[in-house]
Image (cartoon, rainbow, N blue to C red):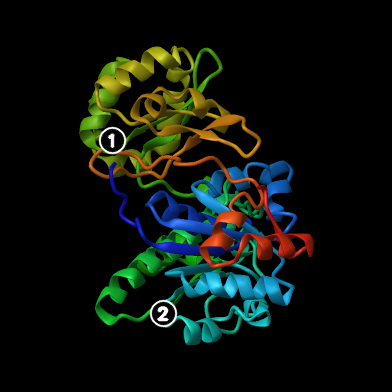
Amino acid sequence: MQQLPLDGVRVVEMSHMVMGPTCGMILADLGAEVIKVEPLKGDGTRRLLGAGAGFFRTFNRNKQSLAVDVETPEGRDAVLKLLDSADVFIENFKPGRMDALGFGYAALKQRNPQLIYATHKGFLAGPYDKRLALDEVVQMMAGLAYMTGPVGRPLRAGSSVNDIMGGMFGAIAVLAALFERQRSGKGREVQSALYENCVLLAAQHMQQYVVTGEAAAPMPNRISAWAIYDVFGFAGGEQMFVAATGDGQWRTLCTLLGQHDLMNDPTLASNNDRVLQRPRLLAHLAEIFATLDARQLAAQLEANGIPFAPIRRPEELFDDEHLIHSGGLARLELEDGSHTEMPLLPFSLDGERLGPRRPIARIGEDTLGVMRGLGYSDDEIVRLRDAGVLRSEQ
């Protein structure tokens, strides 16, 4: 791809963890110059263990690293000069932190009226807006954890869904503001929030209550809208999800399984009929599936247009033939020189995927170049580095 959509757009990102970095990564993958402002020790996300061990490399590709101590006057001045040249500023720190540093929207708007200021918080304006939030906090508050676990056992989703989607909505708002700025010549503040994001995820269940008059049951206890829509065990111990959502799929599945009696049973004629018979129907199908080879059946299901899915673990996706052959995984160089395969943004432009254009930046790898671009002389940069204001890899 010769020119990316956001070529020429400069983004300054002062964020950590997942939500803000996701917004920055999307804009970076789309071609924006994203300069990540990090503390001298680097973004603390670089050092997380356990479930957070993959955060930094996943959400910080295609970015430069400027390591500066913004607690010092000279460090703040450098970042303010950088923001004067920026089109977009991304932040996701606790409420009041940017104002305390002099990087609040009101102050930056005075300096750079065209700046688009993207803030990522726990809550939009309202009674909760001073609270701190985490993905798990809002999943509990907004009903997602209730819907995910069985009755009485709320369970968070198995990914940072709100952080990631919050960053996505932040990026969408930035793109809208960039488009609007072409007409108005003015920037604006845009905000994305974890709680409101999670409420949107729960909206279908809210409306289910309005339509039916009954509260939605947690997913493990729900009454399925489709009779065949479940996970089954197979002869080799594998598990596979199989669905038959329409009458045609039902008839095809019965034919593949040799279950002509089921296909001709008048009590199972329509999907709604089968939903009413679901317990006995699933028990019967479970007995059949338990005698079959999962891979052989999967090939037949695919050939006949029946939805199915093997139950996989995340580490198995590195070997997924579709991701490999479609270009959905790309080789990413990490800050230590090693490499890993990384999933790309889930869309293409004219059939092309947006991949890594540079390795994950080392802490302060781009400090020298950024500071020179702001008009600082090499002597000034050395002085600031020696004074503990900057960190540079050069």
CA separation, marks 1 and 2?
60 Å
Query: Is residue 143 shown to the viewer in this render?
Result: no
Task: State which quarter of the image contains the N terminus.
Answer: top left
Residue at the image point whose x is 38% and y is 43% from the top: 346
Q: Please indicate whether residue 293 sits to the left or right of residue 238 in the image.
A: left
Could you say where residue 296 lies in the image, as x and y percent from the top left? 38, 12
Lower sequence index among marks 1 and 2: 2
| Residue 379, picture quadrant | bottom right
Q: Position of residue 175 (x, y in %)?
A: 35, 65
Between tags 1 and 2, which lies in front?
2
Q: Quadrant of residue 347?
A: top left
The extreme right residue here reads 387
Report the front residue among 383 and 130. 383
User: What residue do we see at 40% from left, 22% from top?
Assistant: 321
The residue that label 1 is drawn on is 267
Please tell me whether mark 1 sits on a helix, a strand or a loop. helix
Compared across the picture, whether 337 is left or right of 111 comes to right
**Viewer can see residue 219:** yes
Question: Closest to the observer: 131 or 255?
Answer: 131
Q: Is residue 204 left or right of residue 305?
A: right
Residue bearing mark 2: 188
Residue 197: mark in rendering: none
Three-letter amino acid code of the residue under disc 1 = Thr
User: Where residue 222 sits in the image (x, y, percent)?
Assistant: 48, 49
Crowd tier of the residue under label 1, counting other residues whose Cα lies within 10 Å: few below 14, some 14–19, many 20 or above: few
Residue at the left extreme of this rendering: 248
Q: Amino acid at mark 2?
A: Arg
Looking at the image, how many numbered discs can be counted on the residues? 2
Compared with 242, 394 (above or below) is below
Compared to residue 135, the image places residue 285 above or below, namely above
